[in-house]
Amino acid sequence: MNKDFLKTLTILYVEDDDKIRTNLEKVFTKVFKKVYFAENGIDALEQYRDIKKIEDLDAIISDITMPKMTGIELLEKIREEDNEIPFLITTAFSDSEYLLKAINHEASYYAIKPINIMELIIKVEKLCESRSHNLVIMEQKKNLEEFLTIINQVAIISKTDASGTILYANDNFCEVSGYSQNELIGNSHNIVRHPDVPASIFKELWQTIKLGQIWKGKLKNRAKNKTGYYVNSTILPLYDDYGKEIIEYIGIRFLTTQEDTEKREFKRKVINNVRQTNEYKIEVNKKIQDLETQLKKYQSVYLIDDALQKEKKKSSKLLSQVNFYEEDLSLIKDKYEDMLFKVNEEAAENRYDIKVLTNEKENLTQKANKLEYEKNKTNKEIKRLNDQILEQSLTIKNLKDVLHHREEQLGLS
């Protein structure tokens, strides 16, 4: 049993037997939120009408054989006023005549005495859960239909079956797409799919709505004349009367302006340019680092030359040894001088390359700064548009509040 749910229920129990009524009273008052008791059908009918004026009554449990008004007669009177409230009948008789009368008057359950209290309580729980769920679904459908009636005047609306076949398309959909209703209904929604939209987006869309969730996003569609148009889309699932299986999907879309489209395209180009610039900056910096590493290697050659000069000065003091090693030192010196000349040539070329790359780096920095300025300018414009969207959202919310207030007025009237 769902004890928390049972504690939300209010029931009316009708029983003329004082002993049975007293025994069940002890159980019912512990299980349910509130229990009203009646001794006969007339008393129960009066209580039912009084209770309905102050609160919701969730279920009625009644004996059949009672003085003044039987349980079947009470059921008949209740059904004249409420076809949905669960009505459970208890009886000591299993006569088929009673059973048929109970069925004809749409009794919810028929229990033979002695009563299995646990089974009866569980049956009340299941019936009330089902009724509560159906009421929620009916209310949601009613609200959705009222909302769609309003939104149908300004939005692009279509409805498909579970596989995506169009079942309904409003006039706005036909006008924007260029297709007639006869051309749209019975066709797949892919009829307006634009080839520019990646398949991954539609895959993600279908995964979302098949899970019973709402998908929102911007899509590019293609009209009958092959021109593209952008829409802000909201796709939501519709369930069967039992709320268990998705049977349809409804799409509500609003056109975006040409200005929005151009700004979105400009933003995409800016992002690509910034990305390419960053990639090029990384490449240039890597080249600069490689050149600096090479320069450090070439510096060791200068150190060798300095060492040779120092050794030459030392060797002048050791004339006897210089005469012995002079020829070898001369050859080594020529070899290193030739190496030094080549290194200096390569270093000069590399310094020129560095200078060119440095100039390119400065130019790229200027371009990046310019792009950053354009980006900031675009962000300000996007913020302004977001503020407009927020203002429109507030207007829609106010409209919903007005509709809700009007619904409450209509309900009071």
Image (spheres, rainbow, N blue to C red):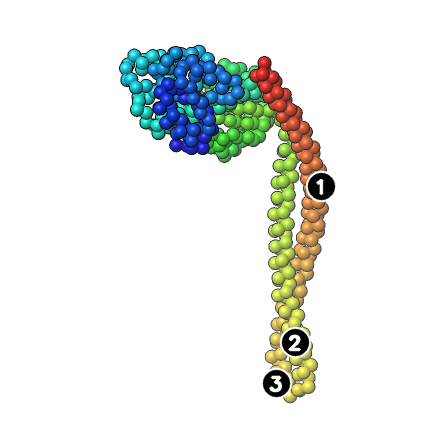
Using residue 106 as the reference point, say whether residue 313 is left or right of it: right
Dot 2 falls on a residue whose secondary structure is helix
Q: In the rendered image, is residue 46 in sight?
A: yes
Instruction: Residue 249 in the image: state x and y as whole percent.
Output: 48, 24
Name the residue at the front extreme: 18
Circle on res. 324: 3
Q: Amino acid at mark 2?
A: Ala
Q: Residue at x 63, y 65 (%)?
A: 296
Q: Nearer the viewer, residue 109 or 290?
A: 109
Q: Amino acid at mark 1?
A: Tyr
Separation (CA) of disc 1 from disc 3: 73 Å
Q: Which residue is mark 2?
A: 307
Using residue 240 as the reference point, say whether residue 376 is left or right of it: right
Q: Residue at x 68, y 59 (%)?
A: 351
Q: Which residue is mark 1?
A: 373
Q: Amino acid at mark 3?
A: Phe
Upstream in the sequence, badge 2 or badge 1? 2
Separation (CA) of disc 3 from disc 2: 20 Å
Q: Residue at x 44, y 15 (%)?
A: 43
Tell me the quarter of the picture where residue 163 sits.
Answer: top left
